Image (tube, rainbow, N blue to C red):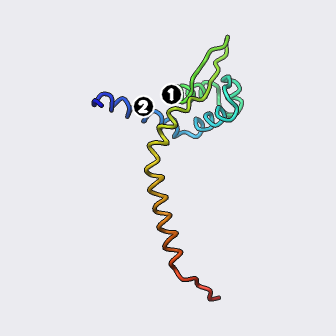
């Protein structure tokens, strides 16, 4: 892998993590996951914000590759693109393994400790 390819991958990962850092954007992803593709107005109905603000959130999600936009007449339909989330999961996997090992060690320590039955 060249330095340029590595830099491009890092920039793409940074966009995904930045997009996921916002609660509104995570909620948009949840809505699209649970309810499937939706027009902007259907998504906007779930939030107490002006539509231009939601459009900015959708732009960030689109640029991160987390949603795709399709025009249908005058409507813009958004759908979830989960591929970048798999990359996030791959990145997080070693940390999950780390914490599992830590908790396993804690469990073993607790199992070795005598029970204190005193009142």
Along the line of sight, the residue nearer the viewer: 99 or 18: 99
Q: Which residue is mark 2?
A: 12
Which residue is located at x 58 percent, y 84 percent?
116
Along the line of sight, the residue nearer the viewer: 46 or 114: 114
Q: Which residue is mark 1?
A: 65
Which residue is located at x 65 percent, y 31 percent?
32
Q: Specify few, some or many for label 2: CA neighbours under 10 Å numbering under 14, 14-19, or 20 or more.
A: some
Which residue is located at x 68 percent, y 29 percent?
36
Along the line of sight, the residue nearer the viewer: 118 or 56: 118
Q: Secondary structure at mark 2?
A: helix
Q: Find residue 77 and report its horizontal and vertical position in percent.
A: 64, 21
Contact, mark 2 vs mark 1 (Cβ under 8 Å): yes
Q: Find residue 20 and report its horizontal and vertical position in percent.
A: 52, 38
Q: Find residue 35 and report its horizontal and vertical position in percent.
A: 70, 32
Image position of 51 with respect to 10: above or below: above
Image position of 51 with respect to 115: above or below: above
Q: Specify few, some or many for label 1: CA neighbours under 10 Å numbering under 14, 14-19, or 20 or more.
A: some
Q: Secondary structure at mark 1?
A: loop
Residue 30's label in the rendered image is none
Of the 4 image quadrants, the one containing the N terminus is top left
Q: Earlier in the sequence, mark 2 or mark 1?
A: 2
How many labels sit on residues?
A: 2
Q: Find residue 2 and report its horizontal and vertical position in percent.
A: 28, 29
Image position of 70 with respect to 94: above or below: above
User: Which residue reaches farthest left?
Assistant: 3
Q: CA distance from mark 2 to mark 1?
A: 9 Å
């Amino acid at each position: 892998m060249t330095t340029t390819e590595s830099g491009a991958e890092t920039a793409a990962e940074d966009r995904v993590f930045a997009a996921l850092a916002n609660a509104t954007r995570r909620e948009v992803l949840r809505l699209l996951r649970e309810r499937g593709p939706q027009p902007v107005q259907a998504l906007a109905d779930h939030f107490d914000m002006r539509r231009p603000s939601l459009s900015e959130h959708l732009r960030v999600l689109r640029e991160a590759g987390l949603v795709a936009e399709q025009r249908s007449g005058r409507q813009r339909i958004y759908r979830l693109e989960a591929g970048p989330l798999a990359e996030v999961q791959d990145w997080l996997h070693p940390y999950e393994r780390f914490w599992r090992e830590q908790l396993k060690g804690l469990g073993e320590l607790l199992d070795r400790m005598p029970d204190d039955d005193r009142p």
